[in-house]
Image (cartoon, coloured by chain):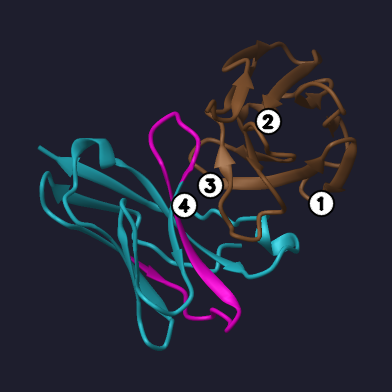
Amino acid sequence: NAGVMQNPRHLVRRRGQEARLRCSPMKGHSHVYWYRQLPEEGLKFMVYLQKENIIDESGMPKERFSAEFPKEGPSILRIQQVVRGDSAAYFCASSPVTANTGELFFGEGSRLTVL
Amino acid sequence: DAKTTQPPSMDCAEGRAANLPCNHSTISGNEYVYWYRQIHSQGPQYIIHGLKNNETNEMASLIITEDRKSSTLILPHATLRDTAVYYCIVRVSGSGAGSYQLTFGKGTKLSVIP
C-alpha cells in the first residue's frame, strides 16, 4: 500500500519562475493537506482540499500561491513568480476522512530552492 | 503559536529508554495530546495520542499527568533509527479546523548515541 507520493522531491527555480508541486494521497484517502516547513522551523498548515473543493485555505499566502485537487489526478500546489523566501520543504498529507483522529499521513516532501 | 513547550534537544544511549517531556499547561478539557516525529529529510510520522489515560502502542508509551498539564513520551528501547525531532501537539477533538491544522513547534531533537 503506497504511501503519500510527492514529486518532485527537489526543485530548483530562479526568482520569477513558477513552481508546481504534486501530491498523490494514499489509496482510499480523499482529503489532502499541504504544510510548509521553513529552514529550522516547524511545519505550518497551508491548505486543506477535498476532490474539486478547497475546504480551508487560511494558511495560504494571499498572493502567488494556489492549490487544487482535481477529480482525476494529484493535488497540485502552485507558486507563481517565486521569491527566495519561498525556499522551503513543502509537505503533503492525506487522511481517509476529515482528520478527526488527528492522524495525518505525510509524504516525504518537496524541497524548493529559489536561486 | 504552539501550545506546548519542549526541551530543544536530548541525548539517549542506544538500548535505553528515551523519556521526552512536554508541557501543555493551558490545555483544554477537549484537547488531545499528540506526538509526531520527523526523521531527517522525511515527512512527519504519527506516533501516539491520548486524552487523559496513559496509552501504549507498538512504537511508544504516553504518560499524561493527572492534571493534564504535562506528558511524557517514552521510547522503551531507543535505537539509532529513533534519532529524530519529536513534536508534542495539542489538538481539539472533532472534525473542525483544529483537527487538521496541527501546530508544530520546534520540537525536541533526540539523538540516540551508540
Residue B70 marker: none
Residue B40 is covered by the magenta coloring: yes
Q: Amino acid at mark 2?
A: Gly
Mark closest to the chain's N terminus, 2 or 3: 3
Q: Nearer the viewer, residue A25 or A62?
A: A25
Q: Nearer the viewer, residue A61 or B51?
A: B51
Using the image, name the chain to which the residue with label 2 belongs. Answer: A
> For the residues marked 1 and 4, what is the alpha-carbon distance in whole angstroms?
21 Å
Instruction: Give the magenta range.
Output: B21-45
Q: Amino acid at mark 4?
A: Lys
Residues flagged by tags 1 and 4 on a common chain: no
User: Which tag is nearer the camera, tag 2 or tag 4?
Assistant: 4
> For the residues marked 2 and 1, what is the alpha-carbon distance in whole angstroms?
19 Å
Name the quadrant containing residue A87: top right
> For the residues marked 3 and 4, what is the alpha-carbon distance in whole angstroms?
5 Å
Mark 2 near mark 1, Cβ–Cβ under 8 Å?
no
Q: Position of residue A80 (x, y in %)?
A: 84, 22
Dot 1 crowding, Cα within 10 Å, few <14, some 14–19, many 20+: few
Residue A58 marker: 1
User: Which tag is nearer the camera, tag 1 or tag 4?
Assistant: 1
List the residue tagged with mark 3.
A42
Using the image, name the chain to which the residue with label 4 belongs. Answer: B
Using the image, name the chain to which the residue with label 1 belongs. Answer: A
Mark 3 near mark 4, Cβ–Cβ under 8 Å?
yes
List the residue tagged with mark 2.
A85
Apparent colour of chain A: brown
> For the residues marked 1 and 3, what is the alpha-carbon distance in whole angstroms?
17 Å
Residue B91 vs A38, above or below: the answer is: below
Q: Secondary structure at mark 4?
A: loop
Dot 3 crowding, Cα within 10 Å, few <14, some 14–19, many 20+: some
Please name the residue shown 81% across and 51% down the image: A58
